[in-house]
Image: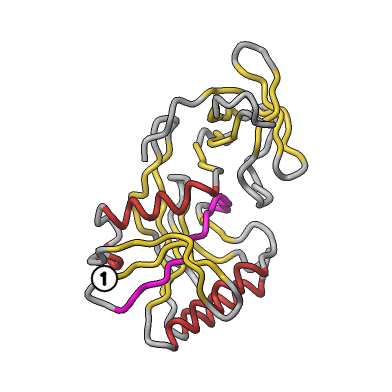
Amino acid sequence: MRLPPLIEGRLIRRYKRFLADVELQDGSLITAHTPNTGRMRGLTTPGNRVWLRDSANPGRRYRYSWVLVETELGVRVGIDTGLANALVREAIEEGTVSSLRGYRRIRQEVRYGEERSRIDLLLQDGPAPDCFVEVKNVTLMEDGIARFPDAVTERGRKHLRELERRVAAGQRGAVFFCIQRADAEAFRPADHIDPDYAEALTRARDRGVEALAWRCSVSPRAIRIDRELPIEA
């Protein structure tokens, strides 16, 4: 996925979950929208290089949105959770994700399920039953292992329950962990942060829900899903 021209700055602070103060290269100070509801552990150190997207809309309350951050070790990480669905869709359409090839139609944000959910991607018109794909954006890294979630998520457990029901009904269900950083070597659920989610993921996989973890190459010019990672229980 090609990114629009981004504006570089230095992070001053992230606060109130959705806001970040940034010093731009010309010395001006702005407040940017943070499109990530997680805790963003390890990514919010003051002084980190960041890249912002300019909406070019002067009427918008926060004209800039935070897209990338560079960690203290020089690793660039995509923090915009809104990009994850598009990244996964692009990878499926290009045939990168071998286990999800062959579907001719992809629908987004389709209502389904007993708990009034919306599926991120619904794959149809393929050689196999319809496939319901729930996408999770991953930024947390610990000792070379990508972890999810970075905060307790009841919503994430609900999505796993919905996928289990799809599988029980004879369809496919998959949870796709989109890791927007290139330094991960494996994926593992963050059981020390949300043991209930880790347990729910194990149960869902035992009941036929597929789990996929792919990492991305990340630069200020483009983000691209390019390598599947092993999932450690």
In this rendering, the answer to whether 127 lies above or below 183 is below
In this rendering, the answer to whether 91 lies above or below 58 is below
Q: Give x and y (percent) for residue 109.
A: 48, 61
Q: Residues within 10 Å of mark 1 (few under 14, many from 20)?
A: few
Secondary structure of the residue carrying tag 1 is loop
The kind of residue tagged 1 is: Asp
**Residue that extends furthest to the front in the rendered view of this protein:** 59
Q: Main secondary structure of the magenta part?
A: strand
**Residue at the (66%, 48%) spot, across then down:** 41
**Residue at the (56%, 59%) spot, across then down:** 147
Residue 217 or 60: which is nearer the viewer? 60
Residue 181 or 163: which is nearer the viewer? 163
Q: What is the quadrant of the N terminus in the image?
A: top left
* Highlighted magenta segment, given as a residue range: 129-143
Q: Give x and y (percent) for residue 226.
A: 33, 49
Question: Mark 1 — residue?
Answer: 125
